[in-house]
Image (cartoon, rainbow, N blue to C red):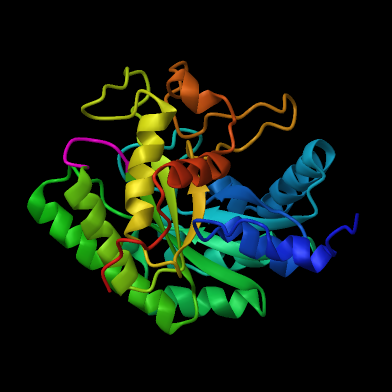
Amino acid sequence: MELPSPDAAASQAPVPRFTSHARRLRERYGARVFRISVPLTREHAAPGGARDHIVRQMVHLNHHHGATRFHAVLDAGMLHKGMLHTGGTLDTGMLDTGAAGEIVQACLAPAPVVGLVLVIDPQHVSAALLDSLRAAASDHDMALELPLPPADAPANALTVAHDAFARAAACGRERSFPVTAVRLMGGIGDGTRQRREDAALLNRLRIRAVRIHPQHRPGKTPTAATEFPTADSYLAAVAELVEHLDPAVQIQGLGPAPLPEQPASGRPAPEHVVPGKPAGPDWMLTGEDFHARLEQTLTTRDSHQGCHAVQ
């Protein structure tokens, strides 16, 4: 019996039902790119603070996961409900000084770090800030990560937040900073209508990628009315959003918001939840591959990314 050639076998492989950011990075760098979070605190602004932190995390991730490529994630604060930092005082005022550029250079100093992501509230984005960071980063990849406002925000606040997001995204695009939106799923008001409106906004702004995390308030039991008591309920909501997103938008982060790992224990360090409180319901703690689960969910729905997108 004649076996099919490798090229023929590849051509018969199922076509992915959504556009994966991780897959794009793997194709570019030949390996998975791991994220290393660097909170924008005075500790990391100290001489060598950010670089030493990056190196420790690189060694840990290489030892436990064989990681060889990294993105430094400079965290200037996800200042919205569902992601509350308690592992240090975030100092967004440092963005107005030369310290931010120095931290960027320190983060990018190790050779395996191939790029930097700035996680920031849209209201803090400015042309001057991005120009200074670009100068500090030289020819490394740079990107912005901006939170979309929660669906249960007051109507007037939601309008202001969406306007700030649009301005920040446009500012980033004009300066060659690809933009990733962070969308928290769940909460009062987060239904089909809001998901379609957010998808239309991201399509219109030509966002490069979107991270889609389930909202969970630490210490509170999730309910079907406000959050996701099961993984299937979360994935159904994600699929609905993805079906309305342009296929050019890459799906970057799924499942619970990633937590930095502790080199000593190898366990996630809950830096963004209240100490002593559960990080989420059991299904959020399994470490499951939600990208594979989304592919299965879309297959079951006989749908794909962009099948309901409105241009």
Seen in the image, is 150 located left or right of residue 290?
Answer: left
Give the image quarter of residue 267.
top right
Considering every residue shown, the one lying at the far bottom of the view is: 174
- Look at 48% across and 39% down and name the residue there: 257
Considering every residue shown, the one lying at the far right of the view is: 1
Seen in the image, is 160 located left or right of residue 268?
Answer: left
Give above or below for 126 relative to 250.
Answer: below
Residue 298 visible in image: yes
Q: How many marks?
A: 0
Residue 83 visible in image: no
- Look at 72% across and 54% down and name the residue there: 32
Coordinates of residue 136 in the picture (x, y in percent): 61, 75
Give above or below for 59 relative to 196.
Answer: above
Coordinates of residue 198 in the picture (x, y in percent): 26, 58
- Look at 67% across and 79% down and name the residue there: 139
Coordinates of residue 18 in the picture (x, y in percent): 49, 57
What's the magenta bit mostly, secondary-structure-wise? Answer: loop
Give above or below for 286 relative to 69.
Answer: above
Seen in the image, is 65 located left or right of residue 18?
Answer: right
If the image is split into quadrants, where does the N terminus sit? bottom right
Q: Nearer the viewer, residue 240 or 1?
A: 1
- Look at 76% across and 42% down and name the residue there: 61
Q: Say if the magenta span includes residue 183.
A: no
Give the image quarter of residue 20.
bottom right
Coordinates of residue 77 in the picture (x, y in percent): 42, 49
Considering every residue shown, the one lying at the far front of the view is: 1
Considering every residue shown, the one lying at the far left of the view is: 156
- Region in magenta: 185-190
Q: Nearer the viewer, residue 128 or 144?
A: 144
Q: Nearer the viewer, residue 260 or 43?
A: 260
